[in-house]
Image (cartoon, rainbow, N blue to C red):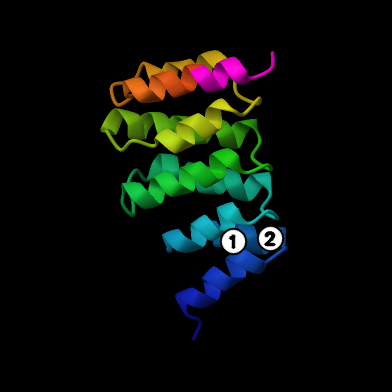
Amino acid sequence: MRTPSYYLDLAGASQDPAVLHELAGSEYPFVRQAVAANPHARADALFALAARCRDVPAEHGPWNDNALLLLLAGHPAADRPALLVVLDAAAARLTAGARPYAAVLALAGRPELHPEELRALGRLPGASARLRSGLRRVLAARRP
């Protein structure tokens, strides 16, 4: 019988895109985070992870969900479709008061997303003055 530890190790070490895509559907939040942290994860697995964040808000608590959003926002293989889903999930969490601030700032540094898409996050009810300031700073540092 395989244990959760087995799946965690596999998610962190695998270089097989099919395995990582399958593990993106894991019931364990730490396995999904390991997939998101794996540099060999491809955009399809990252999209699946992001979609789960959007569709199942606060499934395993705000810390786990926010950590996953941060990993997805910063993953080099995340493409625009996956990042848009992360953006939607971050917006939902901001509105709910879950404070995914690190993920929002990581998204702000992504050239795949348009500045106006990101500025909208600063206007949501859960956005603090510090987050709005950070958004302005990160967006100003981006090259046009």
- Residue drawn at x 53%, y 46% is 71
- Residue drawn at x 45%, y 37% is 102
Q: Is residue 67 above or below residue 89?
A: below
Q: Callout 1, which amino acid? A: Glu
Question: In this rendering, would 7 be left or right of 27?
Answer: right
Q: Which residues are magenta?
A: 137-144
| Viewer-proximal residue among 37 and 32 | 37
* Residue found at the very far bottom of the displayed protein: 1
Q: Which residue position holds label 2?
A: 18
Instruction: Point out residue 90 in the picture as x, y percentages from the top left corner.
Output: 42, 33
Instruction: Point out residue 60 in the picture as x, y percentages from the top left corner.
Output: 33, 54
| Viewer-proximal residue among 15 and 144 | 144
Q: Which residue position holds label 1?
A: 22
Secondary element at image label 1: helix
The reply to whether residue 25 is in sight is no
- Residue drawn at x 41%, y 44% is 66
Secondary element at image label 2: helix
Question: In this rendering, would 42 be left or right of 140?
Answer: right
| Viewer-proximal residue among 135 and 17 | 135
Q: Is mark 1 in CB contact (under 8 Å) with mark 2?
A: yes
